[in-house]
Amino acid sequence: MCFNPPPMRILTLALLCALVAPLTSAQTGSPLDARTLDGYFDRDAKVEVNLRGSLLRLAVEATRDSEPEVAELVNGLNSVTVRIYELDTARGDLTSRISDIGNAFEDSGWFTFVRVRGDEDDPEDVWVYVREDGDLFGGMAVMSLDHEDGEAIFVVIDGLILAIPAHRSVTT
């Protein structure tokens, strides 16, 4: 079995989420339980990423010399969770279920940062939630139904995210 990495735009989306968030508080937790997502699909996630604790510290150390901006970005995170499912394996009305997850985010003090409702010309639905902590953000979650590529994508970034100044860039 050969592993095919997720499309570069998904990784870019996850990195963008981390880049646009300012220094956040130490609040943790998300209403999105990755294990619950498995119940929404007939098959397991085709991509599953669970970075926390020692794995995140390893990423910091591995990138400290060659990519100091990445190391700085990852240093304060508690966890990064990613799930990508094949959309055609969804059980029931997935859009409604994700809207329910969105309501759970809002009930937990998160707010809708971005909501894109797809149409025939651009058939992608996107939900982005952030957790406020005064003037700062305390977490970020992205959920996307990409009907064109046939994927359901879920990304949750939890922990301290250091903003990288606009004049510096992250290379991949």
Image: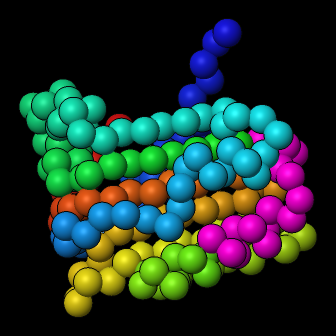
Q: Position of residue 81 (x, y in %)?
A: 45, 47
Which quarter of the rendered picture does the C terminus lie within? top left
Residue 68 in the image: above or below residue 13: above
Describe residue 42's horizontal placement relative to residue 72 as left or right.
right
Identify the residue at horizontal 63%, vertical 70% (top origin). 101
- Residue, far bottom: 134
The colour scheme of the drawn protein is rainbow
Residue 73 in the image: above or below residue 3: below
Residue 12 in the image: above or below residue 112: above
- Residue, far top: 1
- Is any part of residue 10 visible from this angle? no
Identify the residue at horizontal 26%, vertical 60% (top origin). 159
Residue 131 in the image: above or below residue 92: below
Q: Which residues are magenta?
A: 86-101
Describe residue 119's horizontal placement relative to residue 138 as left or right.
right
Q: Residue 47 appears in which quarter of the rendering?
A: top right
Q: Position of residue 92 (x, y in %)?
A: 89, 59
Magenta stretch: dominant secondary structure:
helix
For the residue pair 29 and 1, the one nearer the viewer reads as: 29
* Residue 94 magenta-highlighted: yes
Describe residue 74's horizontal placement relative to residue 68 as left or right.
right
Q: Position of residue 134 (x, y in %)?
A: 23, 90
For the residue pair 136 and 109, the one nearer the viewer reads as: 109
The mark total stands at: 0
Identify the residue at horizontal 60%, vertical 19% (top origin). 3
* Residue 167 magenta-highlighted: no
- Is any part of residue 120 visible from this angle? yes
Which quarter of the rendered picture does the N terminus lie within? top right
